[in-house]
């Protein structure tokens, strides 16, 4: 079979259409797979007490045990200072990957009070917590 210019262009356009369809479905799947995390921040104050060793060695492992597979990677942040050298806005905080929002909500309903009751063991700061959507850049 002889390849004409018309057949070559048609074949190339068909291939581009197929590739576009695959890329579009991959993008739609990625968009449908919205990721979330829990962010907990501890605002700075002059008389702040925060025991990072306790937080990392006891509090966060308790969270992991209570919430099970609904949580993934955890990143602890320790506030150092603002860009002008003044005290940080937050003494510290954590971001916790949520692997299943439904399982996370169920665990939170059951265990949130236990975690909140543990805060005085490592800090005198009232934490600020929120659920965030992770936006890829």
Image (spheres, rainbow, N blue to C red):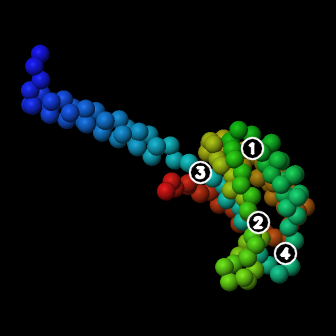
Q: Which mark is residue 36?
A: 3
Name which of mark 2 and mark 1 comes first in the sequence.
Answer: 1
Q: Is residue 1 above or below residue 90?
A: above
Q: CA distance from mark 3 to mark 1?
A: 15 Å
Residue with the mark numbered 4: 48
Q: Position of residue 82 (x, y in %)?
A: 69, 78
Q: Which quadrant of the view contains residue 132?
A: bottom right
Name the secondary structure under disc 3: strand
Q: Is residue 127 visible?
A: no
Name which of mark 4 and mark 1 comes first in the sequence.
Answer: 4
Residue with the mark numbered 2: 78
Mark whose residue sits in front, 2 or 4: 2
Q: Which quadrant of the view contains residue 71?
A: top right
Q: Position of residue 93 (x, y in %)?
A: 74, 63
| Lateral position of residue 23 relative to residue 133, left or right | left
Q: Which mark is residue 67?
A: 1
Name which of mark 3 and mark 2 comes first in the sequence.
Answer: 3
Q: CA distance from mark 3 to mark 4?
A: 29 Å
Q: What residue is at 63 percent from the left and 42 percent from the top? A: 99
Q: Mark 2 touching mark 4, by CB under 8 A?
A: no
Name the secondary structure under disc 2: strand
Disc 2 crowd rating (10 Å Cα; few below 14, some 14-19, many 20+) is few
Name the secondary structure under disc 1: helix
Residue in the foreground of this view, choosing between 47 and 56: 56
Disc 1 crowd rating (10 Å Cα; few below 14, some 14-19, many 20+) is many
Q: Which mark is residue 29?
A: none
């Amino acid at each position: 079979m002889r390849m004409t210019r018309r057949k070559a262009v048609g074949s190339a356009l068909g291939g581009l259409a197929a590739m576009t369809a695959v890329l579009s479905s991959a993008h739609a799947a990625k968009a449908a797979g919205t990721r979330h995390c829990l962010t907990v921040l501890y605002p700075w104050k002059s008389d702040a007490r925060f025991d990072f060793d306790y937080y990392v060695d006891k509090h966060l492992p308790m969270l992991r045990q209570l919430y099970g597979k609904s949580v993934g990677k955890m990143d602890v942040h320790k506030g150092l200072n603002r860009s002008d050298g003044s005290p940080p806005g937050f003494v510290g905080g954590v971001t916790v990957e949520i692997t299943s929002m439904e399982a996370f909500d169920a665990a939170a309903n059951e265990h949130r009070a236990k975690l909140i009751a543990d805060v005085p063991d490592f800090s005198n700061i009232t934490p600020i917590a929120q659920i965030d959507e992770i936006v890829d850049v």
